[in-house]
Image (cartoon, rainbow, N blue to C red):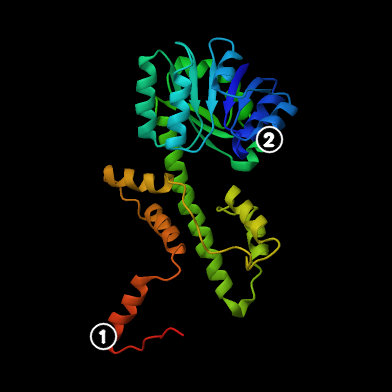
């Protein structure tokens, strides 16, 4: 099947490689000329701009957008919509907010264009393991793209599915990432408790390996924990600073809007905020208050 890929970051480039190996014809473009050249070397057709990209595609055209969410996605989708024709399809495989996706889809529908949102999980390992894809959009449009999804998935009949109308794919991926925050936080806290139990001299890497087989907490995240702890259990070269891509906080916002209690997911997000504070004013005030009402000793700076 012929299609185009806009955006050759790590994930977009890896997806392109997997599609090429699956026999698809791919036209690629990216601001990074070296990334385009690399994909061309693997068998893709390069395009310098959107005009050339669209011209190289047969109708009905399919363009997969794999760029950062927000303003970048907005500008790319708008630029493509100005060049595509009724019946063509734009796929957004990034981590867009589902509300933006619904709005963009409605706008594109007025022009006769199909818009399919694909919440994509798999990271840098998807190139070999396959990608998990949660897909939203019109059933007919999704079905036409089946060969693409079957190639990118872990197996043609596993790891992907049409979950609902426009926006639902990104919504499901948003909640997926919120759950991921909670699972990661649980592993992080548990292993920190292990590390602080000095009297047992626990081997954290060994424990993680034991859990990989037969344990109810075995998972891909546990497998990645094993890899992370293999060389340095103290993680001395890694700063305790944890960003969030946005989907975790969107999940919490959604829980609030729907009156759904989600304390684990909410706290996992808050702990990422804590990791970014070199000096916590709140902790200083807590210490001062303990001193005020109870005369408790205060640890001075320096």
Residue positioned most to the right: 41
Picture coordinates of residue 17, whole percent (x, y) = 68, 30
Q: Residues within 10 Å of mark 1 (few under 14, many from 20)?
A: few
Picture coordinates of residue 50, whole percent (x, y) = 54, 22
Instruction: Provide the residue designation for mark 2.
Output: 34
| Left or right: where 159 falls relative to 246 | right
Q: Nearer the viewer, residue 225 or 288?
A: 288
| Left or right: where 37 falls relative to 149 | right
Q: Residues within 10 Å of mark 2 (few under 14, many from 20)?
A: few
- Determine whether label 2 and label 1 are within 8 Å by CB: no
Give the CA distance from mark 2 to mark 1: 62 Å
Q: Nearer the viewer, residue 143 or 197?
A: 143
| Left or right: where 108 falls relative to 132 | left
Q: Is residue 34 above or below residue 166?
A: below
| Residue at x-position 43% and y-position 34% | 170
| Left or right: where 86 falls relative to 215 | left
| Residue at x-position 62% and y-position 16% | 2
- Whether residue 214 appears in this view of the structure is no
Residue positioned most to the left: 293
Instruction: Provide the residue designation for mark 1.
Output: 292
Labels 2, 1: front one: 2
Mark 1 lies on a secondary structure that is helix
| Residue at x-position 45% and y-position 58% | 272
**N-term-proximal mark, 2 vs 1:** 2
Picture coordinates of residue 70, whole percent (x, y) = 42, 37
Mark 2 lies on a secondary structure that is helix
Picture coordinates of residue 37, whole percent (x, y) = 70, 30
């Amino acid at each position: 099947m012929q299609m185009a890929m806009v955006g050759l970051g790590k994930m977009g480039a890896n997806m392109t490689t997997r599609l090429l190996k699956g026999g698809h014809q791919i036209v690629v473009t990216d601001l990074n000329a070296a990334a385009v050249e690399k994909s061309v070397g693997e068998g893709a057709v390069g395009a310098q701009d959107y005009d050339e990209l669209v011209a190289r595609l047969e109708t009905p055209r399919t363009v997969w957008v794999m760029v950062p969410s927000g303003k970048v996605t907005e500008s790319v989708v708008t630029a493509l919509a100005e060049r595509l024709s009724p019946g063509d399809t734009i796929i957004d495989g990034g981590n867009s907010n589902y509300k933006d996706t619904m709005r963009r889809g409605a706008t594109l529908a007025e022009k006769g264009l199909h818009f399919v949102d694909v919440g994509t999980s798999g990271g840098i390992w998807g190139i070999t393991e396959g990608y998990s894809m949660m897909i939203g959009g019109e059933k007919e449009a999704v079905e036409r793209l089946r060969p693409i999804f079957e190639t990118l998935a872990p197996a043609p009949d596993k790891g992907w599915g049409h979950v609902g109308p426009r926006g639902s794919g990104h919504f499901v991926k948003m909640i997926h990432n919120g759950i991921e925050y909670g699972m990661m936080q649980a592993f992080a806290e548990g292993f920190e408790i292990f590390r602080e139990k000095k009297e047992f001299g626990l081997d954290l890497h060994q424990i993680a390996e034991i859990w990989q087989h037969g344990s109810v907490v075995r998972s891909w995240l546990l497998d990645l924990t094993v890899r992370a702890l293999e060389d340095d259990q103290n993680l001395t070269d890694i700063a305790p600073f944890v960003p969030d891509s946005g989907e975790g906080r969107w999940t919490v916002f959604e829980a609030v809007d729907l009156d759904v209690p989600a304390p684990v997911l909410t706290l996992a997000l808050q702990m990422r905020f804590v990791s970014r504070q070199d000096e916590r004013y709140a902790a200083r005030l807590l210490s001062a208050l303990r001193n005020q009402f109870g005369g408790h000793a205060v640890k001075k700076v320096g």
